[in-house]
Amino acid sequence: MNYSLMFRLRGYRSRLQGPLSVFLGLALTCCLISCSNAKSKPTASEEKTTNIEAAKTVPEMKSYKQKIPGTDVRFEMVPVRGGVYGMGSPTTEKKRKQNEGPQHNVKIEPFWMGKYEVTWDEYDIWTFNLDINRRKVKKLKPSKQDRLADAVTKPTKPYTDMTFDMGHDGYPAICMTQLAAKMYCKWLSAKTGHFYRLPTEAEWEYACRAGKTTAYSFGDNPKKLGDYAWYFANSDEKYHPVGKKKPNPWGLYDMHGNVSEWVLDQYDPKYYYKFGKGKLSLSPLNIPTKLYPRVVRGGSWDDDAEQLRSSSRFGSSKEWKVQDPQLPQSVWYHTDALQVGFRIVRPLRVPSAEEIKRLQLVPDNVKKERD
Amino acid sequence: MSHQNSSSTTRRHFLKTAAVASAGVAVLPSPALTAGAFSDGDDLIRVGLIGCGGRGTGAASQALSTKGNVQLVAMADAFGDKVDKCHHRLQKQFGNKPGRVGVDQDHKFSGFDAYKNVIESGVDLVILATPPGFRPIHFEAAVKAGKNVFMEKPVATDPAGVNKVLDAVKLAKQKNLKVGVGLQRHHQYTYRETLKRIKDGAIGNIVTLRCYWNGAGVWVRPRKKGQTEMEYQMRNWYYFNWLCGDHITEQHIHNLDVCNWLKDGFPVKAWGMGGRQVRKGIDNGEIYDHFSVEFEYADGTRMLSQCRHIPGCWNSVSEHAHGSKGYANLSGVRIESTDGKWRYSGKRNNPYQTEHDDLFAAIRKNTPYNEGHYGAMSTMTSILGRMATYSGKPVKMKKALESNMSLMPKEFAFDATPPTTPDEHGHYPIPVPGVTRPF
């Protein structure tokens, strides 16, 4: 089955502003941007006072820094304009695997994506109630949004330290299950008032490619990979602080390597065969029906160059928690997945409550399946 | 499914353990509580589980995943609900391996004396996985009854308990019983290889050791209406010393034990400081949230240790050795010395499974196997650190053991009074350095 995120395409054909329009040249002909309220471009002085996060239309979409309320921690979001691209790898690509084909055309709606992988600085606020602890110490009252966020389920405390001594401040969070990553998004949405979720697999690859059709967003030559990514050859067998390598053309860091990133989809090696040849698929998502395997993307510090290719796909596995000595094993931690983290997106169009539930954006409806 | 297998495997981190769990499964006659123990030539090892929490259930699952004929035949926990949950979980886990879980309703026991019922159920081996305070009592009873034992760490919470375990270890050796202790790093290939290299001189003479279990803390089980004080403490056991030993004993023992393993000995003296700075809620009982302890071995080598249960701080669960010609990260399995750099690149295993594989293999081959002495002495190392911290005084190992100090209650019953009780606000007395005596 090919589940699709069907977006109502109201509005009008929009000319994209700025350098992003170049790479979307091909896509423009069929790229309709959902936009209910056309607004003129803000002036420079207006822009200073405009709440950039409050953008409602594509032209308004800008990079922004979001402070997590009640903390000193910020994260950065980068706009990714909608468009069409060929998902998967061509049969001619070196080191490709069968699960990356057949290549098919996919249409993506606009969203913002985390400039970096989610770091421990951000993630631990949710896991360990660091915002709540701070309020208690400083005797501060919770805001309305704090109260909403406080009510989101928190994971159990991990028995051991999940950084495994590889670094904390500024380093990517790892070892979480997909459920935990989704729940973090739910908490962050409540906390900030904006809808954040994991990317779909199609969105992830679109953002990783950043308009390129080559194996990596910088070309086909894996010898240049060290400039852009942490992987087995240069990682010293551990993850690294986010944002230390070159970004991709859309300003996203560490899409190749460092840590693999959770997306929303169920992993199915034959999923791409379900797309009709020559047809355009709208925001595809393989809605999960079982716990394993689910998709992670991008490859990691523990992978070789070919696994960092834009089209490379990975499925999660029960073995990712083989060293959790408790039974039942935790639903929150993949104690053995030291290579897995995630990155968040914020779709421009906020989905309805019905869509959130049906598409299992946050959290998961799949009946709890224990190991 | 070749797609999936190749996709979920990273360059080096994948553990080649999946095969272990599915190895050598035989269909067993059931029920198995018939005459003929393992030692009589029957190849079936009958297992009894005492302590049915998450770790006990995990340990039982690992025991039942060892090679050869093995069956769980009896279970016990202070709480009947824990027994039922654990039984259900294991039945589900081994649903496709008939005979592995052969516990009928008559062999599910609950209450403080339930361990005796399990020991009397014709078992060849018992798994001891209750809160650690009970371990000495259970271990002694199992050894006296001639049972092989797998016991979780720590093996006691006080010197009296450690002494009891040390005596039972001697008896177990006399009786040729096999004893495994859940300090699984001893069965982890990375540690084994790294420690071997250091012992072979990779960093020269060891000058100083450091180790840490700095983390965010663990679960809390808040008081529920209708619970007696004893039931509350038994459920929320992590926060009461007679049951848990404080986190320096319950968790940090792993790291202290690695240092002891490397030194082939145990500290003779300790100095420490610590307190209860952040975690002091109504359901956080009497334990501290941080310790910093300096231990001294007989040859004068010092081991620096920290453990903390406070979220949002620098965390590390690790061990390190500094030598006359280099440095070794024992948990990070790296060595840097004047000879150059080395990093472990061999096979990785799941030590929680291997510790059971090794114990069961020793039982089947009847080879000597007893981890009880170092299990007890590493437990005592952690207790020594706790005594030094609570009192603020230097404490000697010999004197601490000789004190035979006991934290345990006089009477075990849900309506009995535990060794510590709360004031009218629900707060428990907290150890005060400079006032509290070491023993």
Image (tube, rainbow, N blue to C red):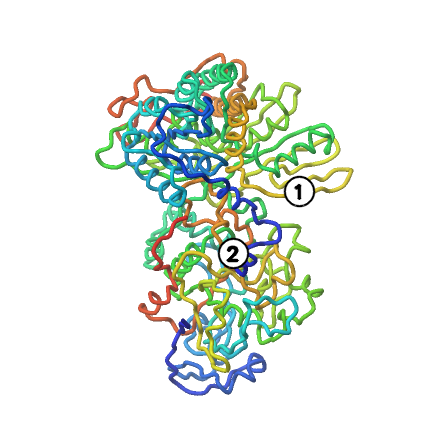
**Residue A46 showing in the rendered view:** no
B169 or B336: nearer the viewer: B169
Q: Residue furthest top?
A: B402
Asked which secondary structure carries label 2, the reply is strand
> Quadrant location of residue B334?
top right
- Percent across and percent down for residue B218 are 42, 39
For the N terminus of chain A, the quadrant is bottom left
Q: Chain of mark 2?
A: A
What residue is shown with label 2? A341
Residue B212's x, y, as percent?
55, 35
Q: Nearer the viewer, mark 1 or mark 2?
A: 1
Q: Amino acid at mark 1?
A: Tyr
The image shows residue B96, relative to residue B237, as above or below, that is below
The residue indicated by pointer 1 is B344
* Residue A149 shows in the view: yes
Q: B286 left or right of B189?
A: left
Measure the C-alpha gap from mark 1 to mark 2: 24 Å
